[in-house]
Image (cartoon, rainbow, N blue to C red):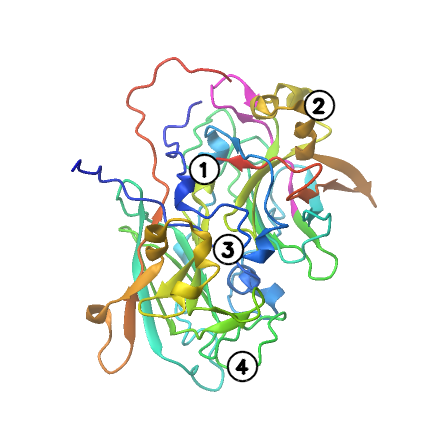
Amino acid sequence: MVPQNEFIQRDRGQHPPGFTPEYKTSVLRSPRLSLWSLQNSLSEVTGPVYGHEELGPLDHDLILNYAKSGEPIGERTIVHGRVLDENGRGVPNALVEVWQANAGGRYRHKNDTYIAPIDPNFGGCGRAITDQDGRYAFRTIKPGAYPFRNYVNSWRPAHIHFSLSGSGFAQRLITQMYFEGDPLIAKDSILATIPDPAARLRLVALLDLNAAVPLDSLAYRFDIVLRGTRSTVFENKLHGN
Amino acid sequence: MIPKLDYLSETPSQTAGPYVHIGLIPHQAGFDIFEKPFGHVMAGPDTKGERIRIEGRVLDGLGQPCRDIMLEAWQANAAGRYNHPADRQTDKDPDPTFRGWGRTGTDFGTGLYHFETIKPGPVIGRRGYKPMAPHINLWLVARGINIGLNTRMYFDDETALNDADPVLRMIEPAVRRETLLARRELRDGAVVYVFDIRLQGEPETVFFDV
């Protein structure tokens, strides 16, 4: 059956291409042949469903969800926003997962050998499910910048990784959020993989003082847009397979 | 100046990076944090269907295994129905014990990934009368992958259904269809489907723009 909720074709011009020599690791990991364009079937418009009850009460609070002997070091920060679709509607029940370095720029990960220390009270990951209006919120500490092996002197701006699962598997998206005002943003080889400078700016979260908690936490706002569904009011004879 | 339509643009993708495990499969990063983590075991004890293991490697342009890939699998149940409200194939029974989804990482040492699941049934195709052969939808992200890659895994023992599959039939040249076939093996009585994914180079796996 032609799915009634098939997605609008993805605008690849908003995204980085696979092959981006300025980000060297992409050279051997990007397909050389064209992607096959596939009209949506049930396999693309459906996707995993998650229940709010699957998450623990602290899963979205990175200040407390790995606290052992105290709270993590760093700038207490709220990151919040809405998950919308391309039609401007909030996406309810989307799974939002985040991960990040600690305040010194070190990840709690076997393969991270950066000189900055692990924070014993910081895991660096969280997850939330959006409410009926598509809203989500995390509390965390602001991550630090860190060096990575690309050029000899390559540094990542402070960033939080975001993973989004909407209602359909074809909406699946991973991206990174940056912080307004960070001078490393303009120097970053990863952000520069996105060809359109205006599209890059949409990954920069803005300081949201109105959402800050006075004497407690700063706040940044980051809205995310997932693919929207196409209107199927008029459908004529279908062509091809 | 011509006004713009009020559609929003999809948020641009960025690489999942080398530490994707922290956020999505923290146990592989080296710690446990959530009471109910997501993982690679997709079928429960009461799930209907043939138990299978899917196993493989993800190879780069030099044919070397990538040891830091995160994969997700999305599939129908044994009757060929997705556990999702948009699937209205009412002639097929739902299986509430089976979400149909899992995630895993290629091993830091061996480069192998695996899922424990059940073999899906055929799902109705886009036009409503041609079924799609049993398949598992896969999505890959990692360091060096700027936007997630979508592919499908089909089963090499479903020859008749594969030959009629509307998606496989579309792929030209036909020799590329073979990159989507997993090889059935028996290992100590257990069914294993081996599915290597080649990101680049001969024979490059077919990836889809869905």
Q: Which residue is mark 1?
A: A46
Q: Secondary structure at mark 2?
A: helix
Report if residue B209 lies within the magenta region: no
Mark 1 vs 2: CB contact within 8 A: no
| Quarter of the figure with residue A142 | bottom left
Check disc 1 and report its element: helix, strand or loop: loop
Asked if residue A151 is positioned above or below residue A54 in the image, the reply reads below
Do marks 1 and 3 share a chain? no
Which residue is disc 4 drawn over? Answer: A116
User: Marks 1 and 3: CB-CB under 8 Å?
Assistant: no
Q: CA distance from mark 2 to mark 4?
A: 55 Å
Give the amino acid at mark 3.
Answer: Thr
Query: Circle 3 sits on which residue?
Result: B15
Q: Position of residue A237 (x, y in %)?
A: 39, 13
From the image, give the main secondary structure of the stretch colored magenta. Answer: loop
Foreground disc of the pair 1, 3: 3
Q: Is residue B143 visible?
A: no
Three-letter amino acid code at the position of disc 4:
Ala
